[in-house]
Amino acid sequence: MSNNLENLVKTIRDRKNKGEDKSYTSSLLSGGLVRCIDKLQEEFDELKEALNDNSNIVHEAADTIYHLLVTLEAANIKFEDVLKELENRKKQSGIKEKNSR
């Protein structure tokens, strides 16, 4: 399962240095962080609607995950660091982690 995400992250990173006319990912990244955030918000809103309507959920979830990864790349946040954070959180309960903030 994680190979799919790893491959997607590699593709996004590869597209970061391509011309924006070469791919959708390149055009998003060349638009900067604000554009990526706006698109992520739009995709999340579509996912919420799909969940409420109980329709097209898998498609919208995939779009949201993709746009999250693109936005992280635009913000120069490594997905590997997000995975490490999730791994660290396995060491304590969610309630304790939430209360520690």
Image (cartoon, rainbow, N blue to C red):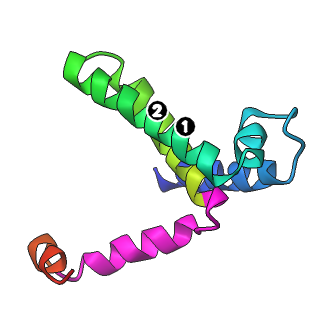
Q: Secondary structure at mark 1?
A: helix
Residue with the mark numbered 2? 42
* Vertical placement of residue 57 versus 28, above or below: above
Assess whether residue 91 is covered by the magenta stretch: yes
Q: Residue at x 44, y 76 (%)?
A: 84
* Vertical placement of residue 6 versus 96, above or below: above
Q: As rendered, which of 92 and 34 lies closer to the eye? A: 34
What is the quadrant of residue 31 in the picture? top right
Residue with the mark numbered 1? 39
- The kind of residue on which mark 1 rests is Lys
Q: Which mark is residue 84?
A: none
What is the quadrant of residue 53 in the picture? top left
* Vertical placement of residue 73 versus 90, above or below: above
Predominant SS of the magenta segment = helix
Write down the region rendered in magenta: 73-92
Q: As rendered, which of 37 and 23 lies closer to the eye? A: 37
